Amino acid sequence: MKIEILSFEWNLFKSDTVESVNANTKIWAITILNGHTPLVTVLNPSILSIVYINELWEKEEKDFAIWSWVLEVSNSEVKVLIDMLVTVDTLDTEKAEKAKKDAIELMEKYKHSKDKIDMDKFIEAEDLLLKSVTQLKLWDLGK
């Protein structure tokens, strides 16, 4: 089975020797194996896990923190279009912890505000929180 993880700007990960893909959709967690039924679904901010055979012909598992986007399965090929991809190697835990703290503080500020809430700002804070929590979950997996 093949996989391509793409952003709007570049190809982020590609393999032609994938055994399985684990992802969290908006409805449930799924495992994609060779011969999976064709599917198009939206992903949650979560950990995307791929088991594949690397260049040394060894089984390897690669985990990515991803942000919501779209996953497509067709003809033993998986394509994932995303806007955030973080590996344990590229993760800045201090930055993720700070982003989490800032997002929680901002959401609390809006939650207890007596003024009209700016929902766009609240949603931005919630997005920031989800992204940082996903990255910290990846860090915990990689320890």
Image: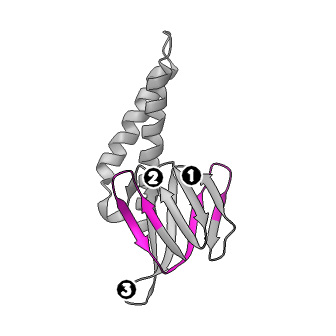
Disc number placed over residue 43 in the picture, else none: 1
Which residue carries the number 3 mark? 55
In the picture, measured across the screen, residue 119 lies left or right of residue 84, that is right
The circle drawn on residue 30 is none
Please state which amino acid type lies under the numbered disc 3: Glu
Image point (37%, 57%), residue name: 86
Quadrant, the N terminus = bottom right
Identity of the amino acid at label 1? Leu
Measured in 3D between alpha carbons, the distance from the residue under mark 2 to the one under mark 3, in whole angstroms, is 25 Å
What amino acid is labelled 2 in the image? Ile
Instruction: Specify the farthest residue to the bottom.
Output: 57
- Badges 2 and 1: C-beta atoms under 8 Å apart? yes
Q: Residues within 10 Å of mark 1 (few under 14, many from 20)?
A: many
Residue 6 located left or right of residue 41: left
Instruction: Give the numbered dot on residue 82.
Output: 2
User: Is the C-beta separation of discs 3 and 1 under 8 Å?
Assistant: no
Identify the main secondary structure in magenta. Answer: strand
Instruction: Judge whether residue 143 can be spotted in this image.
Output: no
Residue sitting nearer the eye, 134 or 22? 22
Q: Position of residue 91 (x, y in %)?
A: 33, 57
- Whole-angstrom CA distance, mark 3 to mark 1, is 28 Å
Please report the bounds of the magenta region as a residue range.
4-30
